[in-house]
Image (tube, helix red, strand yellow):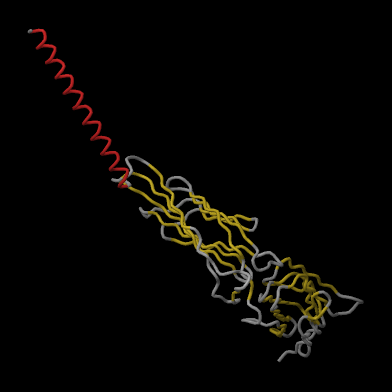
């Protein structure tokens, strides 16, 4: 009888211990489940959140003014890490658009602790541009020249990479270019101006094209030319080439500038040279052609005022 009581007591103790342990395990499981539902990380984790680009107007029907406003696409990516007592986050956001001559990507970096970012680079149109350091809440503009002959709805893929402050952030997206609105904001024009006369002369020719042109040619002469080659400086345009020389023993100098121009782009040609006399007509007639045809009226010889 005594043995039976002892066995019964041991069985009761064993069952009690089992029930206690089971309850503790259930409580732990509930605690874990509750923490996961609340979204609180129990250790060092990284959470990536991306905001995709907004829906833009149809590039086949919409266009942009040469001087803006431009049609902007935006996007961002955020990384979070750390724990509930010491959380961290960083965000890389961008604004992208095109002008008549450029593809532009503005990148902003924000860190929860206010720390600067390491390298930030943008790759587009076959080239990569980067900045070594970008402070938190700062924005960097990356500008890429558009290729000659680009057209509306040309798709431009681009990537953004941010390094430093936890794992790198990599963003890949694309943007469809918008064409220039016809007859809005620019007209084709070709003008010339005599800036300096005397023995040291200077003239400036300005050409604006309403439409994109491939293989334009601007040429004209300089009167009573002496000395070394004229200094010819061309601003804007793409694939620009220059040639100058005299023909048939003449003292006049022939200048040629050839290349491509985007729609509503303005090219400026500044020429400085020496001459044997002062006053009078300092240049010959200048013209601008594409495919052998005048695209604007020629500019007659410039006269000093």
Q: In this view, does 26 lie above or below 298?
A: above
Q: Is residue 199 above or below residue 230?
A: below
Q: Residue at x 43, y 45 (%)?
A: 166
Q: Quadrant of the C terminus?
A: bottom right
Which of 194 and 261 lies nearest the eye of the viewer? 261
Where, by quadrant of the figure, is residue 278 drawn? bottom right
Give the percent coordinates (x, y) of residue 178: 61, 69
Which of 143 and 83 lies nearest the eye of the viewer? 83
Q: Which residue lies furthest to the bottom in this view?
A: 305
Where, by quadrant of the figure, is residue 17 drawn? top left
In the rendered view, does 189 fall on the left or right side of 173?
A: right
Q: In this view, does 97 lie above or below 295?
A: above
Give the percent coordinates (x, y) of residue 250: 89, 79
Give the percent coordinates (x, y) of residue 126: 65, 55
Q: Residue furthest right?
A: 248
Q: Residue at x 14, y 12 (%)?
A: 7
Q: Quadrant of the N terminus?
A: top left
């Amino acid at each position: 009888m005594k043995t039976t009581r002892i066995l019964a007591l041991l069985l009761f103790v064993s069952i009690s211990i089992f029930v206690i342990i089971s309850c503790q395990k259930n409580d732990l499981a509930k605690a874990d489940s509750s923490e996961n539902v609340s979204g609180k990380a129990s250790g060092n984790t990284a959470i990536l959140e991306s905001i995709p680009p907004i829906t833009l107007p149809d590039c086949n029907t919409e266009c942009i003014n040469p001087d803006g406003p431009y049609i902007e696409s935006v996007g961002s990516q955020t990384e979070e890490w750390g724990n509930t007592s010491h959380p961290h986050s960083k965000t890389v956001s961008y604004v992208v658009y095109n002008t008549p001559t450029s593809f532009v990507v503005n990148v902003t970096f924000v860190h929860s602790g206010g720390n600067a970012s390491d390298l930030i680079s943008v790759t587009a149109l076959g080239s990569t541009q980067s900045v070594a350091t970008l402070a938190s809440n700062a924005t960097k503009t990356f500008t890429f020249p558009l290729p000659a002959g680009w057209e509306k709805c040309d798709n431009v893929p681009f990537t953004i990479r941010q390094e430093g402050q936890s794992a790198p952030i990599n963003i890949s997206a694309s943007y469809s270019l918008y064409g220039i609105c016809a007859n809005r904001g620019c007209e084709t024009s070709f003008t010339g101006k005599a800036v300096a006369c005397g023995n040291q002369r200077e003239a400036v020719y300005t050409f604006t094209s309403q439409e994109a042109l491939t293989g334009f040619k601007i040429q004209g002469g300089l009167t009573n030319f002496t000395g070394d080659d004229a200094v010819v400086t061309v601003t804007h345009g793409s694939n620009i080439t220059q040639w100058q020389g005299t023909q048939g023993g003449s003292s006049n100098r022939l200048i040629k500038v050839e290349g491509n121009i985007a729609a509503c782009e303005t090219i400026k040609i500044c020429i400085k040279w020496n001459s044997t006399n002062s006053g009078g007509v300092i240049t010959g007639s200048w013209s601008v052609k594409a495919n052998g045809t005048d695209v604007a009226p020629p500019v007659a010889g410039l006269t000093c005022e």
